[in-house]
Amino acid sequence: INVPPRVAGRTRVGVMGGTFDPIHHGHLVAASEVAAVFDLDEVVFVPTGEPWQKAGKKVSPAEHRYLMTVIATASNPRFSVSRVDIERGGPTYTIDTLRDLHEQRPDSDLFFITGADVMSEILSWHGAEQMWDLATFVGVTRPGHELAIPDGARGVTLMEVPAMAISSTDCRDRVVQGKPVWYLVPDGVVQYIGKYGLYLGARRNQRAAT
Ligand code: ATP
Ligand code: MG
């Protein structure tokens, strides 16, 4: 793995963007592993505003996704959560996320973390051409997805992380089906989902239909 050397006077900050609906241990393990290998001082989790990739799909309100992310990361002194994408409003484009974080942290070098599924789409993103200068891109392995550097991408490093066959989609489906999500998401997130009855809409509809 090609880890850029530390630059005096500059901190190294990982950026983990996601819908986090809900945040799960796949996200947390990936962030922790990249932080260790790339010697990061901090990893900032950035929940999306309106996720444009998921237009038309139901996504929980940003405030719930933000709070679950805070609950899941609160115990790690190197993890934090940013509201930049939520507060900007409208669809989230990674180029805007990186520009905003650069403005807030002019003394930091950014390392944008993506799973293998997202890595393959990255070139199609809005502003992809200008993105490469704003961060080092770290693509991590994810079960069920091929990990490769897309042709035309610059400054991308790939690395293996412990395989966690967990997705937010599966967690939501489990809640709908009444199956447990214990140990797939942090305990506080299990309780938060229960407290607000998240993801039960589909189940209620199912019941209403029968
Ligand atoms: P959904 O099923 O709703 O798409 P998700 O589990 O893919 O949810 P996202 O919030 O879409 O979670 O993902 C945020 C980032 O975390 C993406 O870069 C994604 O590739 C990465 N990621 C998610 N789950 C894993 C995992 N189990 N292992 C490695 N990376 C992951
Ligand atoms: Mg996803």
Image (cartoon, helix red, strand yellow):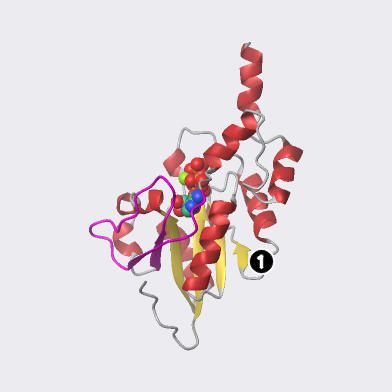
Asked where in the image residue 98 lies, by quadrant, the reply is bottom left
Amino acid type, residue under disc 1 in the picture: Asn
**Quadrant of image for the C terminus:** top right
Q: What stretch is highlighted in magenta?
A: 135-164
Q: Is mark 1 on a helix, strand or loop?
A: loop
Relative to 20, say whether 200 is above or below.
Answer: above
List x then y, in percent, for residue 122: 34, 53
Pointer 1 residue: 76
Q: Of 124 and 1, which appears nearest the observer?
A: 1
Relative to 77, say whether 29 is above or below.
Answer: above
Assign the magenta stretch its main secondary structure.
loop
List x then y, in percent, for residue 67: 67, 51
Asked where in the image residue 41 lies, by quadrant, the reply is bottom right
Q: Residue at x 60, y 45 (%)?
A: 22
Q: Which residue is drawn at 50% across and 76% down?
A: 39
List x then y, in percent, for residue 45: 56, 59
Q: Residue at x 73, y 38 (%)?
A: 194
